[in-house]
Amino acid sequence: MIYAQSPLAIGLFSCFVLFVVGLSFYLGRRTTSASGYYAAGGNIHWFTNGIAFAGDYLSAASFLGICGMIATAGYDGWMYAVGYLAGWMVALFLVAEPMKRLGKFTFTDALDSKFNSKSIQLMAAISTLVVSVFYLIPQMVGAGTLVTPLLGLPHAAGVVIVGVVVTIIVATAGMASTTYVQFMKGGLLLIFSTILVIAVLNRGLSTTPDQGGTKPYHDFVTLQATVADDGSLQLSDPSFVATADWKTSTFGEASFVKLSKDGVDSIWKMTEVATGLELEETLYKAELAGGAVVYNGGTAEDGKFFAVGHMKEIIVNGETVTQTGALGPFAFLQTVQNSNIVLWGSKIIKDGESSYTVYYQKPTLGSKILRPGMKFKVDNATASEKFNFISLMLALFCGTAALPHILIRYYTVPSQAAARKSTIVAIAAIGFFYLLTLFMGIGAMTNGVINIMDNNMSAPLLALSFGVVLFAIISSIAFATVLGTVAGLIVAASGAVAHDLMDNFLGMNMTDKGKVMAGKLAACVVGGIAIYLGIVFEGMNVSFLVGWAFALAASANLPAILMLLFWDKTTARGVASSIGVGLVSAMGLILISPDMYIRYGLLPTDAPISFNSPALISIPLSFLTLVIVSLLTQKDVNRGHATEAA
Amino acid sequence: MGHGPAVKLGKDNASPYKTRLGINMFIFYTLFYVGFIAINAVKPSLFEMTFGGLNLAVIYGIGLIVFAFILALIYNSLCTKAELRMNK
């Protein structure tokens, strides 16, 4: 309704897909060895690998999710970006070079390099699969979310398209084709995000954002009302009529009122003022008793559900203005900070068998938007709320260096110095992109482009406000974003199955050619599972599951990696136990968290724990397990049995 | 067992130096990150203080990103010098 299919976007996407599939088949003919398939022969240039890191890491959650979250919750959305970027310092300073030195194809190789332990091979492979699948689901769901508005295809079609294309990319040339897809995607994302931000700054800020004069902003109406002696509502615009039970209805009890004009219902937010009542126009989506869905009194195609996001009042140098003209990056942030912006709240109201989701205006000071507190409760927070926040920031910090699909990229470069340099390129590229997200998010917040029902589309819709060409390019890059990340995940998961489980754990002693074939078959199976999960989990929040994946990776993998590198007394049983305890404790705490209780249809207050992020408990628990088990199994080391019988 | 690097790596005499340097710089950056979380947890209103027209929240956030890049460059420069010196 807010967006229409763009033939240009479809054309660009098709060209990109044909190009990468063609490239994959070309590279596939040259990929005959296991080293070529799993590690791109170990001869990728550090700069290419660094940008590919960015292409791998900047998933749909980063590009669509963070921009959307900033657009609706301001600085709190950007805190994810700050946490994600900080996590790369763990990778650079502690993990990059040792990972390159110790491993061959998978992250399990590095963990098991000292021990040749069956239990490490099994536990690390399981951890890789679990973390990769949890990361895969949101990417595939994101693919379906994108394809519906942009190509006019159903959710399942988007999931199948991405799943099939990525499986072809991975099954033909493995890490070689995956690297070049990620490199192109990473490069394109940086270039066109920069162009989009320059366009936003050049346009400046306005109280009536008209998208460069191409689309007038919907002027949300305010009505004055008084209550008559008979209890009826007298409105300043008599063409609107309120029902007799306006005050006692479920709407009235929630401080809203349903009005009717020319047979079309609208919902208004009521605020008491000195002269009576002030009614502010809202947006609503109604799921009516008969199953019909109404958007602001019309069908989806009627276009009555407007895109939102505007400045209520702009203050420049102490004076109120209606627009600013072009601004530099710091002046842009300063102006937003000093002004007043309309954010949107939502409320669900049940009216008999019908359910209304009402979106209402929340004018908010820019100084509140550009500091923490809109999404995370930090002011006057309870101990539990503080715990939850610290735990989330810990998971973001520790998760990056423990993601298997990121770690395997260290095996594609020729030396430890190249591993280090590629991490620095990744930090530069990812850091720069996260700076851009702040401007893209606030740009969407103030340019009247947000679909308030699904903020994931904020960045592409911001691009649409600058013309269909930029929209088509940004949308194609959004698809490419999913392709690049999913390809990396499938390589990691197929390596865990073929190399860690089949070759090492089960001792199948495959030939080099057999390892490549096993990897390709595993990629096809994992790709099929990813398609299935992407369809089953339709509607699941994208960033929610990415948060899970980070918490699981940080709890299961990071303690094992760090202790293996920096504590001589670490034993095989200690490593395997720590992975198991980290994985089970993090997942267990997530399953009994208040957020999950909401998804079970239960009350969040009934959950046995009051926090959603498990990292602050599960990471220390994993470390503790490793230390205790390692100390208890030192006897094995002293007897020369540090390695379990293979 | 199919472990060991995918490509043949030469001996790196600078490895212990780089490990020590990495740990020290990691601690340094982590303290900066902990400061950000601590302000959120203890006194979030501090983030409203303005410097040069921008509030502390924005400056600290941008600072964490830019500082990461600067530290990464310093780390690389010191590691490269050590590699050249010790792996002659």
Image: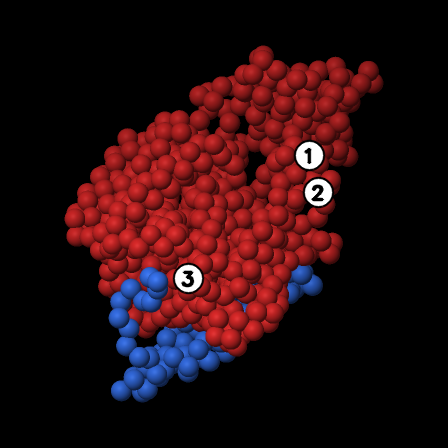
Residue A399 coordinates in the image, percent (x, y): 50, 58
From the image, which quarter does the C terminus of chain A lie in?
A: bottom left
The verdict on a common chain for dots 2 and 1 is yes
Residue A183 coordinates in the image, percent (x, y): 29, 54
The mark that comes first in sequence, 3 or 1, is 1
Instruction: Give the class, few, some or many, for how many residues have Cα within 10 Å of label 3's Cα (few <14, many ≥20).
Output: few
**Residue that carries the numbered disc 3 in the rendered image:** A646
The mark that comes first in sequence, 2 or 3, is 2
Task: Report which quarter residue A521 is drawn in.
Answer: top left
Q: Is residue A642 left or right of residue A255?
A: left
**Residue that carries the numbered disc 1 in the rendered image:** A602
Residue A447 coordinates in the image, percent (x, y): 46, 42
Q: In the image, which lettered chain appears red?
A: A
Amino acid of disc 1: Leu
Q: At 44% across and 32% down in the image, what residue appears? A: A535
Query: Does A627 sit above or below residue A603?
Result: below
Q: Count the marks: how many?
A: 3
Q: At 36% across and 70% down in the image, what residue appears? A: A101
Q: At 26% across and 67% down in the image, what residue appears? A: B7
Separation of residues labelled 2 and 3 (CA atoms): 43 Å
Query: Does A222 sit above or below residue A524?
Result: above
Amino acid of disc 3: Ala
Amino acid of disc 2: Ala
- Label 2: state its secondary structure: loop
Cβ atoms at labels 2 and 1 below 8 Å apart: yes
- Label 1: state its secondary structure: loop
**Residue that carries the numbered disc 2 in the rendered image:** A607
Task: Report which quarter residue A95 is drawn in.
Answer: bottom left
The verdict on a common chain for dots 3 and 1 is yes
Cβ atoms at labels 3 and 1 below 8 Å apart: no
Separation of residues labelled 3 and 1 (CA atoms): 47 Å
